[in-house]
Amino acid sequence: MKTTAELQQIATQVRRDILRMTTAAKSGHPGGSLGTADWFVAMQFNIMDFDPQKFTMSGEGEDMLFVSQGHITPVIYSTMARRGYFPVSELNTFRQFGTRLQGHPSTEHGLPGIRMASGSLGQGMSVGIGAALGKKMTGDKHIVYTMHGDGELEEGQIWEAVMFAGAKGVDNLISTVDYNHQQIDGTVEQVMNLGDLKAKFESFLWKVVVIDNGNDMQQVLDGIAKAKQMSGHGAPVCVILNTKMGYGVDFMQDTNKYHGSVLSANDLPKALSQLEETLGDF
């Protein structure tokens, strides 16, 4: 287990990784990756029960994570590498043709830690429910986690899955929504207002935890711990994670500009100057 301060240091390094990976590749999705770095670090280093050296596709005997908005691979790959799934140096191959670190997660090359090719939005909830039901059938008491973008909730398949999980009491499922209010075409409120998201999930028989500041490591740890305490009691749990897209770099925050656009080589040093190199760059 890491201390909160240690986790914050890792998250800062992960943000450096994200910026350097996407700028070098001249493509990628840095905005949402920066915003969710604290959550991914907390999950990978303190919350989830797993061994990166013993990865199996079945996930038997360990917690499982499915990231439904697969475009945020920069944060996925960085936290996985820093956790020991594969060498940190491999981050240099991000988005290069034929490598394991594709722009969206791919199972083709057998990258440890990846169980789902999540390029198309809306599918992660259904996959997570299937995995959770599989664990119930085998008596595995571990938890299945899913992560979703707020814009992704405009997909109808999400709500079919949410309705099913609540109606069937899939209580070994904890699903987090990255609520940064930004998507590729503008704000979520402008494109498709989600209204009262907490009330929506509760109406589908879910329990809900709201993390007011998803970029505060201690709040993330406390919120997920609360969600774990609520799980196993007859209902799935939703965590509403309020974050800032582009968090960590002042000129990248609270805008959809960097949802799918990357920094120029000239802007990269200015951004990195706001993020201390804590673990060593790849």
Image (cartoon, rainbow, N blue to C red):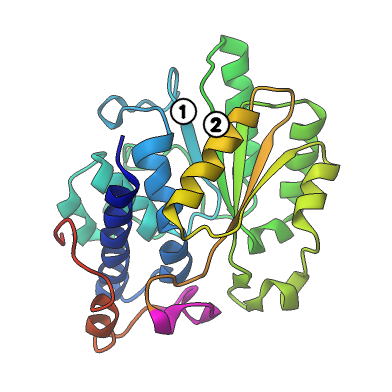
Q: Which residue is mark 1?
A: 63
Determine if residue 101 is in view: no
Total marks placed: 2
Image quarter where the C terminus lies is bottom left
Q: Position of residue 74 (x, y in %)?
A: 36, 60
- Residue 144 numbered tag: 2
Query: In this picture, is 146 found above or below 278?
Result: above
- Spatial CA distance of label 2 from label 1 is 6 Å
Q: Position of residue 239 (x, y in %)?
A: 62, 46
Tell whether position 255 is magenta.
yes
Task: Name which residue lies at 29% across and 80% down.
Answer: 271
The magenta segment: 250-261
Task: Name which residue lies at 69% across and 71% down.
Answer: 188
Query: In this picture, is 26 found above or below 41?
Result: below
Callout 2–callout 1 Cβ contact below 8 Å: yes
Task: Name which residue lies at 53% across and 80% down.
Answer: 255
Name the amino acid type tagged 2: Val
